[in-house]
Amino acid sequence: MSVERSSIQVNFGKPFPLFPLDGVVLLPHALLKLFIFEPRYKQMVERALDGSGFIAMAVFEGNAWKKEYHGNPPIRRHVCLGKIAQHQKLPDGNYNVLMQGVCRARIRQEMPPDEKRLYRTATLEPIETDEKEEDDLFILRDGLLTSLRAEPLPELASVQSVLSELDSREVPTPALLEVVTLSVLNDKPVQYRLLSEGDIFRRGEIVEKELGRLKRLLDRARLQHDPEAPNGVMWN
């Protein structure tokens, strides 16, 4: 998962297109590759490219979307507003798109598709508190790095990837939190909780708590593992 710093200005006075998926796929500072092939979302991308380039990545509410996907199944209130950073239109009319996460937001009012617009839109309001300087985030970052480096977490490929990225370049603390959320924490309710939390210190507490829970699970798995046991056998 790559990260990018930006200071993109957003005009919340206009509605934004909604692109709902099953789970959180984008957070601020993160980059996401998408393959766009549905007619409604191809139209959405084309219009976004003609305008501000913003698309709100939303999350389906419950499982109704599995039966109503081609309609307008309910979505959850919090979204990540992203901006098209790169795009490629393919010969068949489909798109490869690279989205850059910009900010967290909350849906104020949703507008359904109409005769000319095939996709949903919504007016949004930002939920994140003021940005903090890195010096103000020292304790948060130190706790997060300590948690990531605590054995046996570095044995996980996702944690190795995050630590490797930290070794190769400077990653701001807000971006680091988002990368850990998307790369290491695979629990969908936890990811949505972090999407809907506007306070960075509260997000830091949640991420550290979840890393601690993951560490305890791995520790218990280690205790159950016996290298001398018959293949496939664990002792309880």
Image: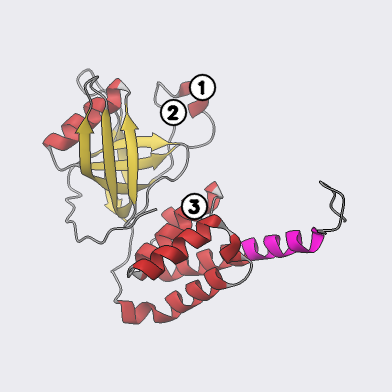
In the drawing, what numbered circle is on residue 73? 2
Q: Nearer the viewer, residue 94 or 135?
A: 94
Residue with the mark numbered 1? 67
Highlighted magenta segment, given as a residue range: 213-225
Q: Nearer the viewer, mark 2 or mark 1?
A: 1
Decide if residue 108 is on the left or right side of residue 220.
left
Mark 1 lies on a secondary structure that is helix
Mark pair 2, 1: CA separation: 9 Å
Q: Are marks 2 and 1 in contact (CB under 8 Å)?
A: yes
Q: How busy is the neighbourhood of tag 2: few (under 14 within 10 Å), some, or many (20 plus)? A: some
Decide if residue 231 is on the left or right side of residue 40.
right
Q: Above or below — where is 171 with respect to 227?
A: below
Residue 214 position by quadrant: bottom right
Decide if residue 26 is on the left or right side of residue 153.
left
Query: Residue visible at 21% across and 34% down?
Result: 88
Residue 70 is situated, as x and y percent measured from the top left of the image, at: 40, 21
Q: Nearer the viewer, residue 180 or 132?
A: 180
Residue 67 is situated, as x and y percent measured from the top left of the image, at: 51, 22
Residue with the mark numbered 3? 191
Q: Above or below — where is 136 with respect to 28?
A: below
